[in-house]
């Protein structure tokens, strides 16, 4: 690794407290978007490519622990310490509905078809709200072994996964029966769980380890030891050949998926890194930290911000042409 190359991120200010969750929308006709959750109680929406601030969602009265956007980035959802989850209009910033809970809500996730919202938190209950009937009581999935830390959907909304703050492992629940069908065993509490874009892998961060699981057969595919305790990890979505991890040492590291070799290390945050996520095209990734900033880093250092895959392939083509010219001489 060339130590002289220093990656300069886009630094996104705005939050006054630690940033604890990040979520990228898929690519939409209007581009892609990044939403951030912070202990300052106000999630923020940004242009995912440039990091430019678009708007702030105001209405929570406590720390916001989790946030997400639906498939079209038209609605946002947030989970808060004020005992509520909220559904927002992502275009106007208005609250569309507030879902009351009896304790801190730690995680939220839109179903793939965007009709359902899944929440979890200190109550040890997973709730599934029908967004077409927001006033109707939610479906409740009980028997979580501990306080819920992360939630996600997979298998075309047939399965949900959850991890707990106070115990290891990831539970996989059958949505129809509401029962645990499998547990991915980890020694430490899983602080981050991500389903890959192609649905093949579940990426987890637990303690000093990043693991990749087969999302269909639930076997452990790869497990890599990290240099420090990591809180979050994310797999590159386009080629699946790289992953990032961030944690208590304030650095965001880039690794080779197949070998686990560290291929990049980005320094810049002034506090532990709580969340890292790849953009939907994989050309950049974002990190959120205790220092209150979101930083957007290029996957390919030295390439300007934007949809870089095309420009990089053009650069390669021109270099090849230069080589051919050299050969002719």
Image (cartoon, rainbow, N blue to C red):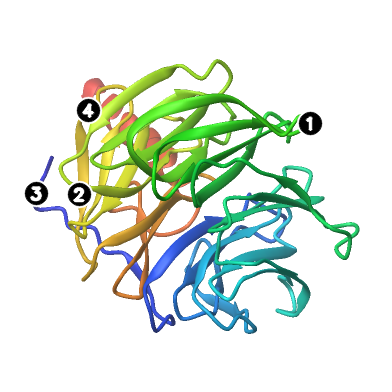
User: Residue 88, located in which quarter of the rendered image?
Assistant: bottom right
Foreground tag (2 vs 3) = 2
Foreground tag (2 vs 1) = 1
Q: CA distance from mark 4 to mark 2?
A: 35 Å
Residue farthest to the left?
3
Compared to 184, does 64 lie above or below?
below
For disc 3, the neighbor class at 10 Å (few under 14, some 14 to 19, many from 20) is few
Q: Which residue is mark 4?
A: 326
Coordinates of residue 280 in the picture (x, y in percent) = 54, 47
> At 23% across and 21% down in the image, what residue appears?
327
Dot 2 or dot 1: first in sequence order is 1
Q: Which mark is residue 265?
A: 2
Foreground tag (4 vs 1) = 1
Under tag 2, what secondary structure? strand
Q: CA distance from mark 3 to mark 1?
A: 52 Å
Q: CA distance from mark 4 to mark 3?
A: 30 Å
Judge by depth and name the residue closer to the eye, 10 or 208: 208
For disc 4, the neighbor class at 10 Å (few under 14, some 14 to 19, many from 20) is few
Q: Is residue 211 left or right of residue 329?
A: right
Coordinates of residue 219 in the picture (x, y in percent) = 46, 16
Q: Which residue is mark 1?
A: 176
Q: Which residue is mark 3?
A: 3
Tag 2–tag 1 contact (CB < 8 Å)? no
């Amino acid at each position: 690794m060339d130590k002289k190359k220093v990656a300069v991120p886009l630094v996104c200010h705005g939050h006054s407290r630690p940033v604890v969750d990040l979520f990228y929308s898929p690519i939409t006709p209007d581009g892609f978007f990044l939403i951030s959750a912070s202990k300052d109680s106000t999630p923020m929406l940004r242009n995912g490519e440039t990091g430019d601030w678009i708007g702030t969602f105001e209405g929570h009265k406590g720390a916001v622990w989790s946030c997400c956007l639906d498939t079209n980035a038209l609605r946002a959802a947030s989970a808060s310490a004020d005992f509520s989850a909220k559904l927002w209009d992502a275009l106007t910033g208005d609250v569309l509905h507030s879902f009351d809970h009896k304790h801190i809500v730690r995680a939220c996730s839109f179903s793939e078809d965007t009709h359902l919202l899944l929440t979890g938190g200190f109550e040890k209950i997973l709730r599934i709200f029908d967004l077409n009937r927001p006033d109707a009581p939610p479906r409740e999935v009980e028997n979580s072994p501990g306080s819920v830390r992360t939630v996600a959907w997979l298998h075309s909304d047939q399965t949900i996964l959850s991890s707990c703050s106070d115990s290891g492992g990831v539970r996989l629940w059958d949505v129809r029966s509401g029962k645990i069908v499998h547990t991915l065993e980890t020694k430490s509490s899983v602080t981050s769980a991500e389903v890959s874009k192609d649905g093949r892998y579940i990426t987890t961060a637990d303690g000093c380890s990043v693991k990749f699981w087969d999302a269909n057969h639930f076997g452990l595919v790869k497990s890599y030891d990290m240099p420090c305790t990591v809180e979050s990890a994310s797999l590159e979505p386009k080629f699946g050949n790289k992953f990032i991890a961030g944690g208590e040492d304030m650095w965001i590291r880039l690794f080779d998926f197949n070998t686990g070799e560290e291929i990049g290390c980005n320094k810049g945050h002034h506090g532990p890194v709580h969340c890292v996520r790849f953009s939907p095209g994989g050309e950049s990734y974002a990190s959120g930290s205790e220092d209150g900033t979101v930083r957007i880093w290029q996957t390919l250092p030295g390439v300007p911000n934007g949809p870089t895959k095309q420009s990089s392939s053009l650069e390669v083509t021109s270099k090849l042409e230069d080589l051919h010219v050299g050969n002719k001489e």
